[in-house]
Image (cartoon, rainbow, N blue to C red):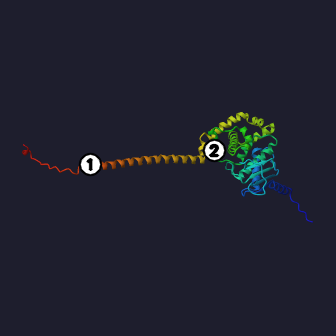
């Protein structure tokens, strides 16, 4: 019998490789652009970004892509606008039938849910506000489009911005209010990153873990209270989005252009009618003038020709 002894390092690499590539299991109607190695990379990137001081939890994660319109699929309890969800610390579900939420792709939605998994694993039983969860999920999954800015700008214009605390109830919101809640969450996360740098996120997480409470840890890391955050955040949003950025909404822009076209068309038609009336009046006056001249000629038709005799000056004398 021949025994082959492999180096310990080789066995370790093989074992680690097998563990890594079996960490995320994809099930159901998996979109072609999504694969396990890519999602494993994203999960590790996310974990490192928010808690570089913690060892990455490489426990198995199951990602199921389901379709409500196809037979043989389990139905998950998601809001009507929901594109996906994180269940506990080990399960992600993504609805491949739903209309894209804020123009996000299936890949972005999947990575978004992995952020929730990572936060839940790191913070364990500590209650994390929904705006912080969703804000980090949107930033770290690169869910950045003009749509979020447009939604917030419309809310600024209509005075319908919501407090961050209200976002905890987002699952019961309509699609429009849910879009606003997610957009505001992203803006709040960007406010923290733009104001203090990306490193503030792991600092907040570390402080939260030490204090055992989100808001106590948040205050310890930034020295601002929840109410102060709301005020600073609103000022940031107003400055960044402005009161008239809602005009970037292409649907509204096209509607305005259509209204301008209709208004211009109406004005042009009024001018055409006025010009036509003027021409008709002028024609009527000309016709009436010709008629009067003709009648005058008829009245003078029987007059006799008058013969005039010219005299010289001498004859007049």
Residue 9 location, x and y as percent? Answer: 84, 55
Q: How many marks?
A: 2
**In the rendered image, which residue does mark 2 sit on?**
150
Instruction: Estimate how packed mark 1 is, as few (under 14), some (14 to 19) or many (20 or more) residues with alpha carbons within 10 Å.
Output: few
Q: Nearer the viewer, mark 1 or mark 2?
A: 1
The residue depicted at 48 percent of the width and 46 percent of the height is 267
Mark 2, secondary structure of its residue:
helix
Residue 52 location, x and y as percent? Answer: 77, 45
Image mark for residue 296: 1
Image mark for residue 141: none
Is residue 200 visible in this depiction of the protein?
Answer: no
| CA distance separating discs 1 and 2 | 76 Å
**Picture quadrant of residue 168:** top right
Pick the quarter of the image with the N terminus.
bottom right
Q: Are marks 1 and 2 in contact (CB under 8 Å)?
A: no
Q: Nearer the viewer, residue 267 or 99?
A: 267
Mark 1, secondary structure of its residue:
helix
Residue 206 location, x and y as percent? Answer: 78, 40
**Label 1 vs 2, first from the N-terminus:** 2
Q: Nearer the viewer, residue 143 or 73?
A: 73
**Picture quadrant of residue 247:** top right
The residue depicted at 47 percent of the width and 48 percent of the height is 269
């Amino acid at each position: 019998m021949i025994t082959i002894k492999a180096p310990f390092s080789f066995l370790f690499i093989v074992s680690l490789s097998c563990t890594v590539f079996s960490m995320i299991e994809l099930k159901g109607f998996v979109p072609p652009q999504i694969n396990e190695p890519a999602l494993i990379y994203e999960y590790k990137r996310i974990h490192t970004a928010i808690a570089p001081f913690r060892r990455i939890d490489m426990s198995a994660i199951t990602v199921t892509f389901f379709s409500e319109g196809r037979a043989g699929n389990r139905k998950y309890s998601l809001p009507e606008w929901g594109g996906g969800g994180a269940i506990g610390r080990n399960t992600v579900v993504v609805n491949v039938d739903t209309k894209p939420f804020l123009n996000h792709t299936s890949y972005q939605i999947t990575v978004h849910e992995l952020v929730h998994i990572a936060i839940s694993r790191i913070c364990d039983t500590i209650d994390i506000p929904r705006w912080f969860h969703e804000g980090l999920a949107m930033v770290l999954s690169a869910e950045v489009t003009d749509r979020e800015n447009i939604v917030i700008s419309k809310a600024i214009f209509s005075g319908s911005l919501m407090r961050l605390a209200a976002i905890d109830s987002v699952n019961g919101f309509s699609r429009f209010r849910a879009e606003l809640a997610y957009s505001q969450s992203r803006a709040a996360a960007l406010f923290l990153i733009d104001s203090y740098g990306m490193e503030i996120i792991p600092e907040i997480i570390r402080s939260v873990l030490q204090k055992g409470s989100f808001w106590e840890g948040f205050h310890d890391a930034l020295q601002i209270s929840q109410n102060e955050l709301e005020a600073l955040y609103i000022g940031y949003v107003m400055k960044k989005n402005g009161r008239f950025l809602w005009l970037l909404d292409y649907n509204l822009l096209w509607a305005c252009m259509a209204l301008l076209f209709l208004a211009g068309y109406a004005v042009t038609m009024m001018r055409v009618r006025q010009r036509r009336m003027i021409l008709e009046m002028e024609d009527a006056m000309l016709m009436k003038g010709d008629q009067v001249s003709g009648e005058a000629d008829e009245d003078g038709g029987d007059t006799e020709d008058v013969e005039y005799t010219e005299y010289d000056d001498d004859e007049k004398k």
